[in-house]
Structure formats: C-alpha cells, structure tokens
Image: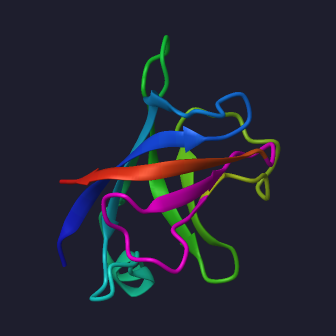
Amino acid sequence: MTTVTVLLALAAGPGFPEGSPEHRYEIGLVLDAGGHPDADAWAADPEPWRARRIVPGAEPEQGDVQHDPDHGWSIRFFGRVAEGPDAPETGFDCGPDPVRPGEHVTVTEPDGRQFTYRVVGIA
C-alpha cells in the first residue's frame, strides 16, 4: 500500500470563475488499480492520511482524510470548531475518472459551496 500526495489547484468556483492556482489542496491517498481512492486501504491503514489546505494570506490548514461508505470522502481539518458531531466536513469527489493530472475533483465546503479543482500533480 503506497500513499501518494495528490496536488489540486482551484480550477473554478464561486468568486473564482477563472480559478486560482494559489488555492490548493494536498491530499494523501492510496489509489486502487483503477486510479481511484481505495476505501479498503483507508480502512486498513492504522496511520491517518494527511491533507492540507493552502489559501493566500493564511497559514496552511492541516487535516486528515475520512471515508464514510454512505457519504464518500471528506477532509477533517484540525482546529475547526464543528457545530456538532454531525456537522459537515469538507467533502471531495474524484468522480468516475482516475485521479491523474488534468482530471478534476469537486470539493464541497461545509457551507455547501462547490469548487472544481484540477489535479496538477501526484507525488
């Protein structure tokens, strides 16, 4: 099981119709043979899969990747004040295509706003 870091840059979203390469995510994932996040590997891994959100003018936010079979993939950011145990986290959906440079990921913020991020690298 090899964890890779998926690098995402904002491609479009509310307030950013042209995107913004300064708004980024770095997400640790194990990809299955088809290039999709591997839920079984996540469940079996004793170590958290790290995530980081980078926005201009702020310190990077640190967090970890979460998976729920009913709700999919999300990122839990450390230090955020949740409104309760069922408060929404930052969701991400890689869609049907493999995670590879040039493909897109939809990120849904806790307030429901959706942004499209482009995969710009896998390290």
Hey, which quadrant is residue 47 in on the image? bottom left
Q: Residue at x 52, y 64 (%)?
A: 66
Judge whether residue 53 can be spotted in this image.
no
Q: Quadrant of residue 82?
A: top right
Looking at the image, which residue is at 77% across and 44% down?
113
Q: Nearer the viewer, residue 44 or 116?
A: 116
Q: Which residues are magenta?
A: 92-112
Q: By what rule are the colours in the image chosen? A: rainbow
Which residue is at the front of the view, 51 or 94? 94
Who is closer to the viewer here, 32 or 87? 32
Q: Is residue 41 left or right of residue 63?
A: left
Is residue 100 found inside the magenta-colored segment of the image?
yes
Q: Residue 2 vs residue 58: left or right?
A: left
Q: Quadrant of the C terminus?
A: bottom left
Q: Let me know if residue 111 is in the magenta part.
A: yes
Please give the name of the residue rendered at 17% of the width and 72% of the height, measured from the top-left corner.
2
The image quadrant where one finds the N terminus is bottom left
Q: How many marks?
A: 0
**Which residue is drawn at the image coordinates 80% and 49% (left, top)?**
112
Vertical placement of residue 26 versus 29, above or below: above
Residue 59 visible to an observer of this rendering: yes
**Residue 37 in the image: x percent, y percent?**
40, 75
Left/right of residue 84 with respect to residue 1 in the rendered view: right
Location of residue 74 (image quadrant): bottom right
Whole-percent x and y of residue 70? 69, 82
Instruction: Give how far across and how far down residue 80 sits, in percent.
Output: 63, 34
What secondary structure predominates along the stretch shown in magenta? Answer: loop
